[in-house]
Image (spheres, grey):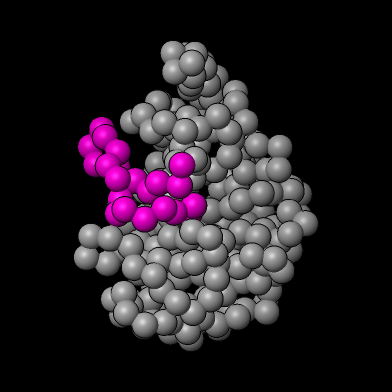
Amino acid sequence: MKAVAAFLLVLCCLAVSDAWNCVEAPRLSYANQIDAGMGQVVATDRYKRAYFLSGSSWYRLGTYSLQHVTVGPSGTWGTYLNRVYKYVAGNFKLANGVGLLQVDAGGDGQVVGVGPSPYRAYCLRESYALAYAGVGSVSWSYLSRVLKYYSCGPQYGCWGVDTSSRVYVTKYITPTSCSTSSWTYVSGLSMKMIEVGTDGSVFGVTTTGKVYQRSGISSSRREGTSWVYIPMCMPIKHVTYDLRQLWVVTTSGLVMKCSR
């Protein structure tokens, strides 16, 4: 089975558009989710184990089970069974305060996330996120928004996907207060997840497993102008982007690294 999976991955790499050069990433069996930021790459597998990439190998990150992990200016955070954890002194520590399914630490110091049904969106202020050292609880701000996936970058605001798979962008978020601008609907595609890179690049995966990049994003037009399709020969589950590297997890659990 592993040989078949590797062969399919090679075919997938060869089939990608000339604009992107994809290679097989260091092997992480049954990868489920991946996140890149601050030059680091972290991931989870289907057995709810978290890993970090060093050189050409993946190493276990802490000893706790995690369904989602993220890394950014505010540190490394994760979730499991609606509980939130921060990586502190070599292991994950429970951060009481609100229950979340997914978190993102890619913003300008704040941490954002979405809870279980009814999928409310939350933000943790920069001062709380940076200072939390594994003791006590933290105070999250409710953003009066229903989302199933939420991601921020330090430059051009935050993007989210609601429970109807519609895409929205808020043009700014203030790390010190978690105040945001109004949300703008971005038409054209139905997404299951979306990620914002450190440089403001935005990539998403549609409900059918196709990868798109949002083009035309700038300080004056943070919602961008159009979606650009990135061909992949297999359905995709998850993507992340940092330092000109696009990391892709297929629905079968294979990992690719793409650049251009």
- For residue 69, what is the image quadrant? bottom left
Residue 116 visible in the displayed image: yes
Number of numbered labels in the structure image: 0
Residue 227 coordinates in the image, percent (x, y): 66, 45
128 w.r.t. 152: above or below: below
In the image shown, does 66 or 232 lie closer to the viewer?
Answer: 66
Determine if the magenta segment contains residue 248: no
Residue 197 coordinates in the image, percent (x, y): 46, 54
Q: Quadrant where the C terminus lies?
A: top left
In the rendered structure, the answer to whether residue 214 lies left or right of residue 19 reads right
254 w.r.t. 11: above or below: below
Q: Main secondary structure of the magenta part?
A: strand
In the rendered structure, the answer to whether residue 40 lies left or right of residue 10 reads left
- For residue 162, what is the image quadrant? bottom right
Residue 120 coordinates in the image, percent (x, y): 65, 72
In the image shown, does 194 or 147 lie closer to the viewer?
Answer: 147
From which residue to which does the magenta span run? 47-68
29 w.r.t. 9: above or below: below
- Which residue corresponds to the image point at 36% horizontal and 82% vertical from the top-left? 136
In the rendered structure, the answer to whether residue 47 lies left or right of residue 159 reads left
- Which residue corresponds to the image point at 28% horizontal and 60% vertical from the top-left? 91
- Which residue corresponds to the image point at 65% horizontal and 37% vertical from the top-left? 209
In the rendered structure, the answer to whether residue 126 lies left or right of residue 8 reads left
Determine if the magenta segment contains residue 66: yes
87 w.r.t. 213: above or below: below
- Which residue corresponds to the image point at 55% horizontal and 29% vertical from the top-left? 252
